[in-house]
Every structure is written in structure tokens, then in C-alpha cells.
Amino acid sequence: MRRALAATTAALLLAGAAACSTSDSSSTHDTKTGPAASRPITASSAFSGVSARVSTAKQSGTVTAANDPNHLLGRPNQYTSKVTFTDTRIKASDVSGSEKGALERGGAIEVFADASDAKARADYIQSVTKAMSALAEYDYVHDTVLVRVSHYLTPDQAAEYKAAADALK
């Protein structure tokens, strides 16, 4: 009887271990993070999603701590990644003299660790630029992503970026 019980227990343990493991590389279960865990969004991956919907957007740069003109990348409550982009609908004559990566050439995508930080940044930008039309911009927040768009685009053109931001997963 003891032998039968031991054999049954061993068989159950082996069956359980086999059920928990798989050699199928197409499995959607990651034993460390749970079912089909997604990677955290970055500014680059957000831009990929946005540019798939707004074909006139072309990435123009990746902001690093060394080249960030705002000196905010990685700082407490600030963006964790940022990219800049151009929009081919903006006239070259409107942005002549502006530097590569300047927001008015198209825009920027900033990603934050927390959605409230993204909203706080958008609110701050809007409050600072409210009285200065030359610095005005469209800002769209979707969760931890802030999509900043040049005021040289028409409201309908800028709305394409809002729809693209809203579609981010």
C-alpha cells in the first residue's frame, strides 16, 4: 500500500511538473511576470504606434540625459524617455532657423513612470505657453505618454495625433 501511494504521488508530481513547463516557444505565459506580460512603453515604442497612424510623422531624434535641452530626463517626476519628430505638413519656411529636434518642426513624445506626472507636465506646459502664442502647442496625454504637437499644424491635423495617442496600448 505504501509503495502504491508513493508511486501515485511521484506520478502526480511528475505530471504536475510537466503541465507547468513547455518547450513551445509560442507560449504566451512568462513564468516571471504572468500571462503575456507586455514590455513597458518607451517614447520610441509610442512613436512607432503614433507614426503608424500619422504617416507624415518622422522621428528626428532621441533625447538622452546628455543632450536634453530641458535637463529633465530621468529626474524625479519627469520623463523617463523622449523622442522628437518632424511632420512633413509643416512648411520649412515656418520653422527656418529652429534647431533639429525643435518642437515646432513636428513634436515630441515624452513617457513618464506615472500617469499623474504626464498630466502634470502637460498642465505645466499649457500654463507657461498660454500667454505666448509663439510657444503654444497641442498636448495629448494617454496614460503615461505625453504627445506634444507643433502649433503649426491645423487643429484637424493635430487631432490625428490625439487619435493616435488614444490608440496606444
Image: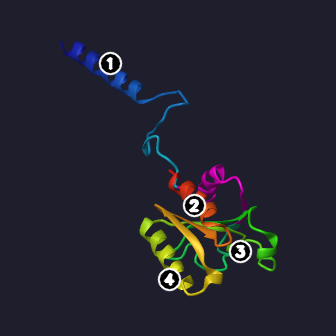
Residue contact between numbered discs 4 and 2, judged by CB atoms under 8 Å: no
Callout 1 secondary element: helix
In the image shown, does 125 or 62 lie closer to the viewer? 125
Decide: few, some or many residues near mark 1? Use Cα within 10 Å; few <14, some 14-19, many ≥20: few
Q: Determine which of the numbered discs, if any, sits on residue 11 in the image.
A: 1
Using the numbered discs, state the Cα–Cα distance from disc 2 to disc 3 in whole angstroms: 20 Å
Disc 3 target residue: 102
The residue mark sitting in front, 4 or 2, is: 2
Callout 2, which amino acid? Answer: Ala
Under mark 4, the amino acid is Ser
Residue located at (55% from left, 67% from top): 80
Dots 4, 1 in contact, CB < 8 A: no
The verdict on residue 45 being magenta is yes
- Which residue, given by chain and number where applicable, does mark 2 sit on? 159
Q: Position of residue 116 (x, y in %)?
A: 42, 69
Residue 126 located left or right of residue 63:
left
Tag 4 residue: 127
The magenta segment: 41-61
Q: Residue furthest left?
A: 1
Give the amino acid type for the residue marked by disc 3 in the picture.
Answer: Ala
Check residue 24 in the rendering and tell me which mark sits there, or answer none.
Answer: none
> Dot 2 surroundings within 10 Å: few (below 14), some, or many (20 or more)?
some
SS label for mark 3: loop
